[in-house]
Image: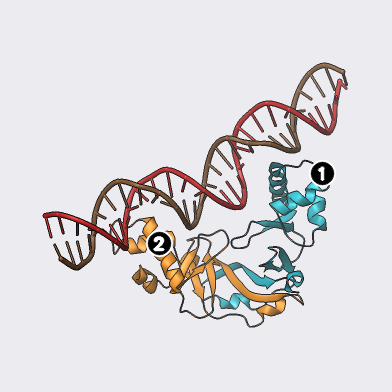
Chain colours: A orange, B cyan, C brown, D red
Amino acid sequence: MRAALESAERPLSVDELLEAASRRVKGLGVATVYRAVSTLLAEGWIDAVEIRGEATRYERADKGHHHHFQCEKCDRTFDLSGCLDNVRKLAPPRFRVRQHSVTLYGLCAGCAS
Amino acid sequence: MRAALESAERPLSVDELLEAASRRVKGLGVATVYRAVSTLLAEGWIDAVEIRGEATRYERADKGHHHHFQCEKCDRTFDLSGCLDNVRKLAPPRFRVRQHSVTLYGLCAGCAS
DNA sequence: GAGTAAATGATAATAGCGTATCATTAGCAA
DNA sequence: TTGCTAATGATACGCTATTATCATTTACTC
Protein backbone atom coordinates (compact mmCIF):
# COMPACT_ATOMS: atom_id res chain seq x y z
CA MET A 1 0.00 0.00 0.00
CA ARG A 2 2.73 2.38 0.97
CA ALA A 3 4.72 1.25 -2.01
CA ALA A 4 1.83 2.03 -4.34
CA LEU A 5 1.46 5.53 -2.97
CA GLU A 6 5.19 6.00 -2.88
CA SER A 7 5.68 5.18 -6.52
CA ALA A 8 2.58 6.98 -7.78
CA GLU A 9 3.48 10.34 -9.16
CA ARG A 10 -0.02 11.64 -8.59
CA PRO A 11 -2.75 11.46 -5.93
CA LEU A 12 -4.69 8.23 -5.99
CA SER A 13 -8.30 7.54 -5.18
CA VAL A 14 -9.28 4.51 -3.17
CA ASP A 15 -10.22 2.73 -6.37
CA GLU A 16 -6.94 3.56 -8.04
CA LEU A 17 -5.11 2.54 -4.91
CA LEU A 18 -6.99 -0.73 -4.80
CA GLU A 19 -6.06 -1.45 -8.37
CA ALA A 20 -2.43 -0.46 -7.97
CA ALA A 21 -1.99 -2.42 -4.78
CA SER A 22 -3.80 -5.43 -6.19
CA ARG A 23 -1.04 -5.82 -8.70
CA ARG A 24 1.32 -6.58 -5.87
CA VAL A 25 -1.01 -8.38 -3.51
CA LYS A 26 -3.77 -10.56 -4.90
CA GLY A 27 -7.38 -10.51 -3.76
CA LEU A 28 -7.26 -7.24 -1.92
CA GLY A 29 -10.56 -5.81 -0.70
CA VAL A 30 -11.77 -2.21 -0.48
CA ALA A 31 -12.12 -2.45 3.28
CA THR A 32 -8.42 -3.06 3.65
CA VAL A 33 -7.62 -0.07 1.50
CA TYR A 34 -9.91 2.17 3.53
CA ARG A 35 -8.37 0.86 6.71
CA ALA A 36 -4.85 1.47 5.47
CA VAL A 37 -5.79 4.95 4.33
CA SER A 38 -7.21 5.80 7.76
CA THR A 39 -4.04 4.64 9.43
CA LEU A 40 -1.76 6.51 7.07
CA LEU A 41 -3.83 9.65 7.44
CA ALA A 42 -3.66 9.39 11.22
CA GLU A 43 0.09 8.88 11.00
CA GLY A 44 0.35 11.91 8.79
CA TRP A 45 2.07 9.87 6.12
CA ILE A 46 -0.50 10.86 3.50
CA ASP A 47 -2.82 13.80 2.97
CA ALA A 48 -6.29 13.85 1.51
CA VAL A 49 -6.84 15.70 -1.75
CA GLU A 50 -10.42 16.74 -2.19
CA ILE A 51 -11.69 17.98 -5.49
CA ARG A 52 -15.26 19.03 -6.08
CA GLY A 53 -17.42 16.24 -7.32
CA GLU A 54 -14.56 13.77 -7.19
CA ALA A 55 -13.75 10.92 -4.87
CA THR A 56 -11.06 11.84 -2.38
CA ARG A 57 -7.51 11.15 -3.50
CA TYR A 58 -4.51 10.56 -1.30
CA GLU A 59 -0.88 11.49 -1.71
CA ARG A 60 2.33 11.43 0.26
CA ALA A 61 2.37 14.17 2.83
CA ASP A 62 5.98 15.13 2.34
CA LYS A 63 5.44 17.09 -0.84
CA GLY A 64 5.52 20.80 -0.24
CA HIS A 65 2.59 23.14 -0.67
CA HIS A 66 1.14 22.66 -4.10
CA HIS A 67 -2.11 22.43 -6.02
CA HIS A 68 -3.82 20.13 -8.46
CA PHE A 69 -4.91 19.63 -12.00
CA GLN A 70 -7.96 17.56 -12.79
CA CYS A 71 -8.18 16.01 -16.23
CA GLU A 72 -11.73 16.17 -17.53
CA LYS A 73 -11.20 13.27 -19.86
CA CYS A 74 -9.29 10.55 -18.03
CA ASP A 75 -10.45 11.76 -14.66
CA ARG A 76 -7.02 11.61 -13.12
CA THR A 77 -5.57 14.16 -10.73
CA PHE A 78 -2.09 15.59 -11.19
CA ASP A 79 0.16 17.66 -9.03
CA LEU A 80 1.10 21.18 -9.96
CA SER A 81 4.24 22.63 -8.57
CA GLY A 82 4.32 25.97 -6.88
CA CYS A 83 1.62 28.38 -5.91
CA LEU A 84 0.57 31.96 -6.45
CA ASP A 85 1.90 34.40 -3.95
CA ASN A 86 -0.97 36.83 -3.92
CA VAL A 87 -3.84 34.45 -3.37
CA ARG A 88 -4.75 35.83 0.01
CA LYS A 89 -5.20 39.27 -1.40
CA LEU A 90 -8.42 38.17 -3.02
CA ALA A 91 -10.12 38.11 0.35
CA PRO A 92 -12.16 41.12 1.42
CA PRO A 93 -10.96 43.09 4.43
CA ARG A 94 -11.66 41.53 7.82
CA PHE A 95 -11.88 38.06 6.37
CA ARG A 96 -9.31 35.73 7.88
CA VAL A 97 -7.82 33.32 5.37
CA ARG A 98 -6.60 30.05 6.80
CA GLN A 99 -6.03 28.02 3.69
CA HIS A 100 -6.75 28.03 0.01
CA SER A 101 -7.02 25.73 -2.91
CA VAL A 102 -6.32 26.30 -6.56
CA THR A 103 -7.45 23.68 -9.01
CA LEU A 104 -7.06 23.72 -12.75
CA TYR A 105 -9.33 21.71 -15.00
CA GLY A 106 -8.75 20.66 -18.56
CA LEU A 107 -6.87 18.00 -20.46
CA CYS A 108 -3.66 16.42 -19.26
CA ALA A 109 -0.73 15.98 -21.60
CA GLY A 110 -1.83 12.49 -22.55
CA CYS A 111 -5.43 13.40 -23.30
CA ALA A 112 -4.64 16.67 -25.07
CA SER A 113 -2.81 15.01 -27.93
CA MET B 1 -37.28 31.84 -6.24
CA ARG B 2 -35.66 34.19 -8.66
CA ALA B 3 -36.23 37.01 -6.21
CA ALA B 4 -34.45 35.09 -3.47
CA LEU B 5 -31.42 34.47 -5.65
CA GLU B 6 -31.53 37.99 -7.00
CA SER B 7 -31.42 39.60 -3.60
CA ALA B 8 -28.89 37.19 -2.09
CA GLU B 9 -25.44 38.68 -2.09
CA ARG B 10 -23.86 35.25 -1.98
CA PRO B 11 -24.36 31.79 -3.50
CA LEU B 12 -27.14 29.81 -1.88
CA SER B 13 -27.49 26.11 -1.35
CA VAL B 14 -30.77 24.34 -1.95
CA ASP B 15 -31.48 24.44 1.75
CA GLU B 16 -30.71 28.12 2.03
CA LEU B 17 -32.78 28.76 -1.04
CA LEU B 18 -35.66 26.80 0.39
CA GLU B 19 -35.53 28.80 3.56
CA ALA B 20 -35.22 32.13 1.82
CA ALA B 21 -38.02 31.42 -0.62
CA SER B 22 -40.26 30.03 2.11
CA ARG B 23 -40.36 33.42 3.69
CA ARG B 24 -42.15 34.70 0.64
CA VAL B 25 -44.20 31.65 -0.30
CA LYS B 26 -45.51 29.38 2.43
CA GLY B 27 -45.28 25.60 2.44
CA LEU B 28 -42.66 25.26 -0.23
CA GLY B 29 -41.14 21.82 -0.75
CA VAL B 30 -37.61 20.79 -1.64
CA ALA B 31 -38.77 19.20 -4.87
CA THR B 32 -39.95 22.54 -6.15
CA VAL B 33 -36.66 24.14 -5.32
CA TYR B 34 -34.74 21.43 -7.14
CA ARG B 35 -37.07 21.78 -10.11
CA ALA B 36 -36.63 25.54 -10.21
CA VAL B 37 -32.88 25.20 -9.94
CA SER B 38 -32.79 22.78 -12.88
CA THR B 39 -34.81 25.16 -14.98
CA LEU B 40 -32.73 28.17 -14.08
CA LEU B 41 -29.53 26.27 -14.75
CA ALA B 42 -30.82 25.19 -18.15
CA GLU B 43 -31.80 28.77 -18.91
CA GLY B 44 -28.35 29.88 -17.90
CA TRP B 45 -29.83 32.30 -15.38
CA ILE B 46 -27.82 30.78 -12.55
CA ASP B 47 -24.54 28.92 -12.25
CA ALA B 48 -23.59 26.12 -9.89
CA VAL B 49 -20.87 26.77 -7.35
CA GLU B 50 -19.27 23.58 -6.19
CA ILE B 51 -16.97 23.50 -3.23
CA ARG B 52 -15.29 20.36 -1.93
CA GLY B 53 -17.33 18.63 0.70
CA GLU B 54 -20.09 21.20 0.47
CA ALA B 55 -23.55 21.06 -1.00
CA THR B 56 -23.75 22.79 -4.34
CA ARG B 57 -24.63 26.49 -4.19
CA TYR B 58 -26.22 28.55 -6.91
CA GLU B 59 -25.75 32.15 -7.89
CA ARG B 60 -26.80 34.53 -10.62
CA ALA B 61 -24.90 33.87 -13.79
CA ASP B 62 -24.42 37.49 -14.72
CA LYS B 63 -21.62 38.14 -12.30
CA GLY B 64 -18.27 38.22 -14.02
CA HIS B 65 -15.51 35.71 -13.50
CA HIS B 66 -14.80 35.41 -9.81
CA HIS B 67 -14.02 32.97 -7.04
CA HIS B 68 -15.26 32.04 -3.61
CA PHE B 69 -14.57 32.13 0.06
CA GLN B 70 -15.87 29.44 2.33
CA CYS B 71 -16.34 30.28 5.98
CA GLU B 72 -15.32 27.38 8.16
CA LYS B 73 -17.48 28.52 11.01
CA CYS B 74 -20.84 29.64 9.65
CA ASP B 75 -20.51 27.46 6.58
CA ARG B 76 -21.56 30.19 4.21
CA THR B 77 -20.03 30.86 0.83
CA PHE B 78 -19.02 34.36 -0.24
CA ASP B 79 -18.00 35.88 -3.52
CA LEU B 80 -14.53 37.21 -4.04
CA SER B 81 -13.97 39.78 -6.71
CA GLY B 82 -11.29 39.47 -9.28
CA CYS B 83 -8.90 36.70 -10.13
CA LEU B 84 -5.22 35.99 -10.45
CA ASP B 85 -3.82 36.57 -13.88
CA ASN B 86 -1.13 33.94 -13.85
CA VAL B 87 -3.15 30.95 -12.75
CA ARG B 88 -2.73 29.08 -15.99
CA LYS B 89 1.00 29.23 -15.70
CA LEU B 90 0.88 26.66 -12.96
CA ALA B 91 0.05 23.98 -15.48
CA PRO B 92 2.84 21.83 -16.85
CA PRO B 93 3.64 22.07 -20.54
CA ARG B 94 1.26 20.27 -22.90
CA PHE B 95 -1.57 20.40 -20.38
CA ARG B 96 -4.57 22.25 -21.73
CA VAL B 97 -6.29 24.38 -19.12
CA ARG B 98 -9.98 24.95 -19.70
CA GLN B 99 -11.04 26.40 -16.41
CA HIS B 100 -9.84 26.87 -12.89
CA SER B 101 -11.14 27.48 -9.45
CA VAL B 102 -9.63 29.31 -6.54
CA THR B 103 -11.24 28.92 -3.16
CA LEU B 104 -10.17 30.49 0.08
CA TYR B 105 -11.12 29.01 3.44
CA GLY B 106 -11.18 30.68 6.79
CA LEU B 107 -13.40 32.98 8.77
CA CYS B 108 -15.69 35.55 7.24
CA ALA B 109 -15.82 39.08 8.62
CA GLY B 110 -18.71 38.21 10.89
CA CYS B 111 -17.14 35.12 12.36
CA ALA B 112 -13.64 36.56 12.67
CA SER B 113 -14.64 39.12 15.24
C1' DG C 1 -68.85 26.48 -11.76
C1' DA C 2 -66.94 22.35 -14.65
C1' DG C 3 -63.21 20.44 -17.00
C1' DT C 4 -58.48 19.87 -18.07
C1' DA C 5 -53.53 20.23 -17.98
C1' DA C 6 -49.67 21.64 -15.59
C1' DA C 7 -47.42 22.59 -11.18
C1' DT C 8 -46.73 21.31 -6.44
C1' DG C 9 -45.30 18.84 -2.14
C1' DA C 10 -44.64 14.62 0.56
C1' DT C 11 -41.96 11.03 0.37
C1' DA C 12 -39.96 6.80 -1.70
C1' DA C 13 -36.14 5.60 -4.40
C1' DT C 14 -31.53 6.08 -6.09
C1' DA C 15 -26.49 6.87 -6.35
C1' DG C 16 -21.91 7.55 -4.62
C1' DC C 17 -18.84 7.14 -1.05
C1' DG C 18 -17.48 5.60 3.15
C1' DT C 19 -18.04 2.70 7.68
C1' DA C 20 -19.49 -1.37 10.51
C1' DT C 21 -20.06 -6.13 10.93
C1' DC C 22 -18.61 -10.68 11.08
C1' DA C 23 -17.13 -15.08 9.58
C1' DT C 24 -12.74 -16.56 7.67
C1' DT C 25 -7.82 -16.56 7.20
C1' DA C 26 -3.09 -15.61 8.28
C1' DG C 27 0.53 -15.22 11.44
C1' DC C 28 2.93 -17.05 15.02
C1' DA C 29 4.28 -18.97 19.61
C1' DA C 30 4.48 -23.18 22.21
C1' DT D 1 -0.04 -29.51 14.86
C1' DT D 2 -2.72 -26.75 18.33
C1' DG D 3 -4.46 -22.65 20.05
C1' DC D 4 -5.06 -17.84 20.00
C1' DT D 5 -5.02 -13.02 18.36
C1' DA D 6 -5.01 -9.73 14.78
C1' DA D 7 -5.80 -8.74 10.03
C1' DT D 8 -8.56 -9.47 5.99
C1' DG D 9 -12.41 -9.47 2.53
C1' DA D 10 -17.27 -9.77 1.39
C1' DT D 11 -20.95 -7.35 2.08
C1' DA D 12 -24.61 -5.07 4.71
C1' DC D 13 -25.47 -0.67 6.30
C1' DG D 14 -25.58 4.49 6.71
C1' DC D 15 -25.40 9.07 5.21
C1' DT D 16 -26.13 12.92 2.10
C1' DA D 17 -27.60 14.98 -2.03
C1' DT D 18 -30.53 14.48 -5.72
C1' DT D 19 -34.26 12.39 -8.66
C1' DA D 20 -38.64 9.87 -9.44
C1' DT D 21 -43.27 8.96 -8.26
C1' DC D 22 -47.87 10.11 -7.63
C1' DA D 23 -51.89 11.85 -5.44
C1' DT D 24 -53.42 16.52 -4.76
C1' DT D 25 -53.79 21.32 -5.76
C1' DT D 26 -53.66 25.18 -8.65
C1' DA D 27 -54.34 27.82 -12.75
C1' DC D 28 -56.86 28.72 -16.57
C1' DT D 29 -60.37 28.13 -20.26
C1' DC D 30 -64.99 27.68 -21.52
B44 left or right of A6? right
Point out the image quarter for the N terminus of chain A.
Answer: bottom left
Residue D3 percent coordinates (x, y): 19, 56
B37 left or right of D5? right
Q: Say which residue label 2 marks.
A: A35
Q: In the rendered structure, the residue with mark 2 lies on which chain? A: A
| Residue located 34% across and 64% down the image | A21
Q: Which mark is residue B54?
A: none
Calculate the distance from the C-alpha at mark 1 to the C-alpha at mark 2. Answer: 48 Å
Considering the numbered disc 2 on the image, is that residue within a helix, a strand or a loop?
A: helix
B56 left or right of A42? right
Residue A7 percent coordinates (x, y): 37, 73
Front label number (1 vs 2): 2
| Residue located 79% across and 62% down the image | B9
Q: Nearer the viewer, residue B70 or B112?
A: B112
Q: Say which residue label 1 marks.
A: B25
Q: Do callouts 1 and 2 point to residues on the same chain? A: no
Residue B94 percent coordinates (x, y): 51, 73
User: Residue flagged by tag 1: what amino acid is it?
Assistant: Val
Q: Nearer the viewer, residue B67 or A74?
A: B67
Considering the numbered disc 1 on the image, is that residue within a helix, a strand or a loop?
A: loop
Question: Quadrant location of residue C9?
Answer: top right
